[in-house]
Image (tube, rainbow, N blue to C red):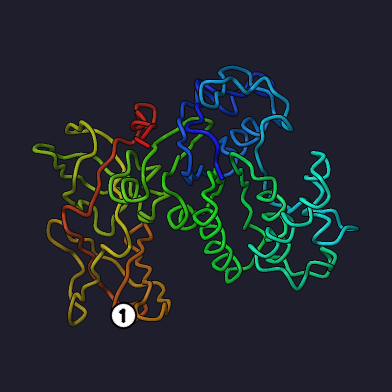
């Protein structure tokens, strides 16, 4: 469906009252890509989407579609489809009339409107609900109507602003699959805003992680999952344990660190250094829960561990089907781990992790340089 080769954002920014909500966004999107903008509330991801849509004028920078500048065009002349978090359906119009509305505004002939609307409604599997009003539909069905209304226009680009955040967990899973199916079957180019890293990983070809209006890292899901550029990105990519520490020694791409607030003090870990580190540097250590091994101290003995061993006390155990999520209190720090069997709450345990699964990042985020933001078509 996409009728362009590349969309370029060059130094795009938006300022509100002297504060940059979005600053220096450089990104090239290829036709057929699914790109997710990921970050917490206030990071600039929705601002970026609204600037693309033409709902917000740029403070600086420009947007080009196949070399043609479009940021000076009004929203209706950009040819983009938009799916909002709130669905934004007309409550007094039926499903088919909601889907037809944009085509009518474009002056498409009535016969063509009818065939395109039927095709779009069938795509989202709502044929039997075509005559119903939005209020007669579930949340997931209303979101399908919003998607049909966007794709029926055959847009060059579809913009989605947290479209699943109002749905329950099961519906979110179902709709994720549906959105990916539509993206692939229609050959859409999609830019998708979310704060949910699992959602972004499952849907996107590339992720753009943002913080305070600036890009922190751009890459494929695999690249960001395995090689986050900073502890901030690691936090969004599932490294739930982000621990303050101080470097004791660093060489050969590894760093030995001493954890702050550990149970017995002086607990040291060795991990992969991300960036240049020196002894005395303040850092953040990132470890995924599934990479922390829970071991028994045995017989109620001492909880003090050797190098690379974190002693603690089990504070919570949650059943997750084939495994257990285990919360371990290590001094002032709560650590999250996974275990095949449930340890006793209140029991003393030790936590260990392979060196190559422990990442050591500079504490400061100011020096983070985003990875290359363009990939080959």
Q: Considering only vertical position in the picture, is 45 above or below 118?
A: above
Which quadrant of the figure has residue 320? bottom left
What residue did someone put label 1 on?
343
Relative height, residue 292 to residue 245 (above, below)? below
Disc 1 packing (10 Å; few <14; some 14–19; many ≥20)? some
Task: Name which residue lies at 83% across and 50% down.
Answer: 110
Task: Indicate the quadrant containing the N terminus: top left, top right, bottom left or bottom right.
Answer: top right
Q: Nearer the viewer, residue 253 or 46?
A: 46
Q: Quadrant of residue 333?
A: bottom left
Depth check: 356 or 317 in front?
A: 356
Relative to 60, is 290 on the left or the right?
Answer: left
Question: Left or right of 326: which side holds 266?
Answer: left
Image location (x, y in percent) of residue 268: 18, 51
Residue 363 point in image, percent of width and height: 33, 36
Numbered-mark total? 1
Image point 52% across, 64% down: which residue? Answer: 177
Q: Residue at x 66, y 68 (%)?
A: 125
User: Among all residues in the image, which is located at the extreme left?
Assistant: 252
Disc 1 on helix, strand or loop? loop
Quadrant holding the C terminus: top left
Rendered position, 165 above or below 157: below
In the picture as drawn, the residue positioned furthest to the right comes out as 92
Answer with left or right where residue 267 lies relative to residue 182.
Answer: left
Give x and y (percent) for residue 34.
48, 46
**Residue 368 versus residue 307: which sits nearer the camera?**
368
- Residue at point 39%, 32% (across, down): 373
Question: Taking 343 as reference, is 92 left or right?
Answer: right
Q: Position of residue 334 (x, y in %)?
A: 38, 60
């Amino acid at each position: 469906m996409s009728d362009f080769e590349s969309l370029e954002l060059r130094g795009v920014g938006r300022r509100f009252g002297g504060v940059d909500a979005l600053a220096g966004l450089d990104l090239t999107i290829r036709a057929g890509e699914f790109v997710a903008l990921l970050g917490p509330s206030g990071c600039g991801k929705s601002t970026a989407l609204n600037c693309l849509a033409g709902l917000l004028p740029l403070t600086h920078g420009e947007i080009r579609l196949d070399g043609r500048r479009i940021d000076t065009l009004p929203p209706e002349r950009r040819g983009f489809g938009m799916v909002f978090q709130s669905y934004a359906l007309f409550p007094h119009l039926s499903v088919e009339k909601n889907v037809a509305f944009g085509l009518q505004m474009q002056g498409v002939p009535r016969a063509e409107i009818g065939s395109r609307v039927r095709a779009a409604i069938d795509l989202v599997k709502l044929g039997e609900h075509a005559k119903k009003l939005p209020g007669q539909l579930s949340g997931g069905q209303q979101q399908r109507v919003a998607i049909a209304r966007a794709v029926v226009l055959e847009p060059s680009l579809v913009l989605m602003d947290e479209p699943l955040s109002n749905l329950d967990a099961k519906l979110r899973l179902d709709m994720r699959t549906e959105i990916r199916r539509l993206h692939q079957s229609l050959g859409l180019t999609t830019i998708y805003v979310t704060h949910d890293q699992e959602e972004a990983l499952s849907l996107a070809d590339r992720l753009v992680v943002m913080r305070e209006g600036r890009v922190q890292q751009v890459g494929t899901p695999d690249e960001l999952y395995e090689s986050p550029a900073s502890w901030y990105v690691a936090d969004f990519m599932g490294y739930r344990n982000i621990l303050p520490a101080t470097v004791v020694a660093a060489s050969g791409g590894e760093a030995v660190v001493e954890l702050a607030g550990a149970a017995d003090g002086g607990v040291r870990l060795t991990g992969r250094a991300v960036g240049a580190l020196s002894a005395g540097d303040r850092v953040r250590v990132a470890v995924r829960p599934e990479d922390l091994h829970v071991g028994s101290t045995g017989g109620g003995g001492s909880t003090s561990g050797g190098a690379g061993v974190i002693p603690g006390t089990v504070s919570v155990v949650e059943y997750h089907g084939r495994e257990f999520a285990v919360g371990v209190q290590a001094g002032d720090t709560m650590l999250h781990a996974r275990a095949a069997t449930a340890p006793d709450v209140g029991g003393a345990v030790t936590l260990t992790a392979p060196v190559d699964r422990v990442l050591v990042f500079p504490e400061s985020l100011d020096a983070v340089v985003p990875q290359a933001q363009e990939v080959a078509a």
